[in-house]
Amino acid sequence: MTFQYRPEWKHHPLEIPSGEHKGKFTAYDPSVPGMAPPDHPDHGKTGQEAIGASILTDSLIAEYKEKNTWAQMREYRDKELVNTDWTQGVDVPDSIKLPYQTYRKKLREIGDAATTADVVWPTKPS
Protein backbone atom coordinates (compact mmCIF):
# COMPACT_ATOMS: atom_id res chain seq x y z
CA MET A 1 0.00 0.00 0.00
CA THR A 2 1.28 3.45 -0.84
CA PHE A 3 0.24 6.87 0.37
CA GLN A 4 -2.77 8.37 -1.39
CA TYR A 5 -4.17 11.83 -0.72
CA ARG A 6 -7.81 11.81 0.44
CA PRO A 7 -10.08 14.82 -0.16
CA GLU A 8 -11.64 14.48 3.32
CA TRP A 9 -10.07 17.03 5.65
CA LYS A 10 -10.68 15.73 9.14
CA HIS A 11 -7.46 17.23 10.50
CA HIS A 12 -7.70 20.82 9.28
CA PRO A 13 -11.17 21.78 8.03
CA LEU A 14 -11.27 25.06 6.14
CA GLU A 15 -13.32 27.89 7.63
CA ILE A 16 -15.19 29.82 4.95
CA PRO A 17 -13.95 33.39 5.39
CA SER A 18 -16.83 35.42 3.92
CA GLY A 19 -20.11 35.37 2.02
CA GLU A 20 -23.35 33.65 2.97
CA HIS A 21 -21.44 30.61 4.32
CA LYS A 22 -19.05 32.70 6.47
CA GLY A 23 -17.93 30.91 9.62
CA LYS A 24 -19.02 27.49 8.39
CA PHE A 25 -16.41 24.83 7.77
CA THR A 26 -15.76 22.48 4.90
CA ALA A 27 -14.07 19.20 5.69
CA TYR A 28 -13.84 18.25 2.02
CA ASP A 29 -11.26 19.59 -0.43
CA PRO A 30 -13.07 22.41 -2.28
CA SER A 31 -10.94 21.92 -5.38
CA VAL A 32 -12.54 18.55 -6.19
CA PRO A 33 -16.19 17.89 -7.06
CA GLY A 34 -18.26 17.78 -3.91
CA MET A 35 -20.78 15.35 -2.62
CA ALA A 36 -24.00 17.23 -3.34
CA PRO A 37 -26.86 14.86 -4.18
CA PRO A 38 -27.90 14.52 -7.85
CA ASP A 39 -30.98 16.71 -7.41
CA HIS A 40 -29.00 19.57 -5.78
CA PRO A 41 -28.04 22.57 -7.98
CA ASP A 42 -24.38 22.21 -6.88
CA HIS A 43 -24.15 18.55 -7.93
CA GLY A 44 -20.92 17.96 -9.84
CA LYS A 45 -19.43 21.32 -8.85
CA THR A 46 -16.33 21.82 -6.76
CA GLY A 47 -16.75 23.59 -3.44
CA GLN A 48 -14.88 26.52 -4.94
CA GLU A 49 -17.38 26.70 -7.82
CA ALA A 50 -20.35 26.42 -5.46
CA ILE A 51 -19.14 29.02 -2.94
CA GLY A 52 -17.13 31.24 -5.25
CA ALA A 53 -13.51 31.53 -6.32
CA SER A 54 -13.32 35.01 -4.83
CA ILE A 55 -14.10 33.52 -1.40
CA LEU A 56 -12.34 30.16 -1.63
CA THR A 57 -9.30 31.38 -3.51
CA ASP A 58 -6.75 29.08 -5.10
CA SER A 59 -4.12 30.20 -2.56
CA LEU A 60 -6.42 29.54 0.41
CA ILE A 61 -7.25 26.07 -0.92
CA ALA A 62 -3.57 25.34 -1.59
CA GLU A 63 -2.65 26.35 1.97
CA TYR A 64 -5.25 24.05 3.49
CA LYS A 65 -4.50 21.22 1.07
CA GLU A 66 -0.85 21.36 2.13
CA LYS A 67 -1.83 21.23 5.83
CA ASN A 68 -4.18 18.33 5.28
CA THR A 69 -1.75 16.44 3.08
CA TRP A 70 0.95 16.74 5.76
CA ALA A 71 -1.48 15.43 8.38
CA GLN A 72 -2.49 12.53 6.13
CA MET A 73 1.15 11.73 5.37
CA ARG A 74 2.05 11.67 9.07
CA GLU A 75 -0.94 9.43 9.79
CA TYR A 76 0.07 7.04 6.99
CA ARG A 77 3.71 7.09 8.10
CA ASP A 78 2.79 6.41 11.74
CA LYS A 79 0.68 3.40 10.75
CA GLU A 80 3.54 2.08 8.63
CA LEU A 81 5.94 2.46 11.56
CA VAL A 82 3.55 0.57 13.85
CA ASN A 83 3.10 -2.15 11.22
CA THR A 84 6.87 -2.65 11.02
CA ASP A 85 7.65 -2.49 14.75
CA TRP A 86 7.97 -6.27 14.81
CA THR A 87 11.05 -6.05 12.58
CA GLN A 88 13.09 -4.50 15.37
CA GLY A 89 12.65 -7.24 17.96
CA VAL A 90 15.71 -8.81 19.58
CA ASP A 91 14.88 -12.17 18.01
CA VAL A 92 14.61 -10.80 14.45
CA PRO A 93 17.62 -11.68 12.26
CA ASP A 94 19.79 -8.85 10.97
CA SER A 95 18.90 -9.78 7.39
CA ILE A 96 15.39 -8.47 8.17
CA LYS A 97 16.14 -5.98 10.94
CA LEU A 98 18.79 -3.87 9.15
CA PRO A 99 16.86 -3.13 5.92
CA TYR A 100 13.84 -2.20 8.03
CA GLN A 101 15.94 0.08 10.23
CA THR A 102 16.88 2.04 7.12
CA TYR A 103 13.29 2.04 5.86
CA ARG A 104 11.91 3.22 9.21
CA LYS A 105 14.55 5.95 9.46
CA LYS A 106 13.54 7.24 6.02
CA LEU A 107 9.87 7.17 7.05
CA ARG A 108 10.69 9.32 10.09
CA GLU A 109 12.53 11.79 7.83
CA ILE A 110 9.60 12.58 5.51
CA GLY A 111 8.77 15.58 7.71
CA ASP A 112 12.15 17.09 6.78
CA ALA A 113 10.87 17.84 3.27
CA ALA A 114 10.06 21.49 2.55
CA THR A 115 6.67 20.67 0.99
CA THR A 116 4.50 17.62 0.51
CA ALA A 117 5.48 17.60 -3.16
CA ASP A 118 9.11 17.08 -2.07
CA VAL A 119 8.36 13.93 -0.06
CA VAL A 120 9.93 10.78 -1.46
CA TRP A 121 8.45 7.67 0.07
CA PRO A 122 10.99 4.94 0.75
CA THR A 123 10.55 1.48 -0.73
CA LYS A 124 9.50 -1.09 1.83
CA PRO A 125 11.94 -4.01 2.07
CA SER A 126 10.62 -7.27 0.69
Image (spheres, rainbow, N blue to C red):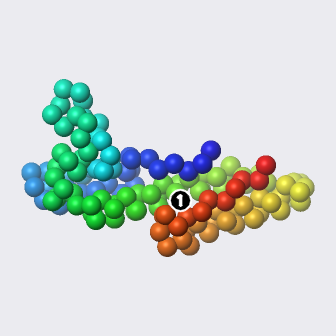
Q: Residue at x 27, y 61 (%)?
A: 58
Q: Is residue 23 visible?
A: no
- Examine the rendered structure and indicate whether residue 106 appears above or below residue 23: below
Q: Residue at x 79, y 49 (%)?
A: 126
Seen as rendered, the residue at the extreme left is: 20
- Examine the rendered structure and indicate whether residue 79 appears above or below residue 58: above
Q: Which residue is mark 1?
A: 74
Q: Amino acid at mark 1?
A: Arg
Q: Quadrant of residue 113?
A: bottom right
Seen as rendered, the residue at the extreme top is: 39
Q: Position of residue 88 (x, y in %)?
A: 79, 58
Q: Position of residue 82 (x, y in %)?
A: 66, 53
**Left or right position of 85 against 66:** right
Mark 1 surroundings within 10 Å by alpha-carbon count, few (fewer than 14), some (14 through 19), many (20 or more): some
- Examine the rendered structure and indicate whether residue 113 appears above or below residue 90: below
Q: Quadrant of residue 77?
A: bottom right
Q: Position of residue 69 (x, y in %)?
A: 44, 57
Q: Secondary structure at mark 1?
A: helix
Q: Residue at x 23, y 27 (%)?
A: 38
**Left or right position of 110 against 32:** right
Q: Position of residue 102 (x, y in %)?
A: 75, 65
Q: Nearer the viewer, residue 22 or 44?
A: 44
Please identify the quadrant where the N terminus is shown: top right
Q: Residue at x 70, y 61 (%)?
A: 104
Q: Is residue 32 visible?
A: yes
**Left or right position of 1 against 35:** right
**Left or right position of 77 against 7:** right
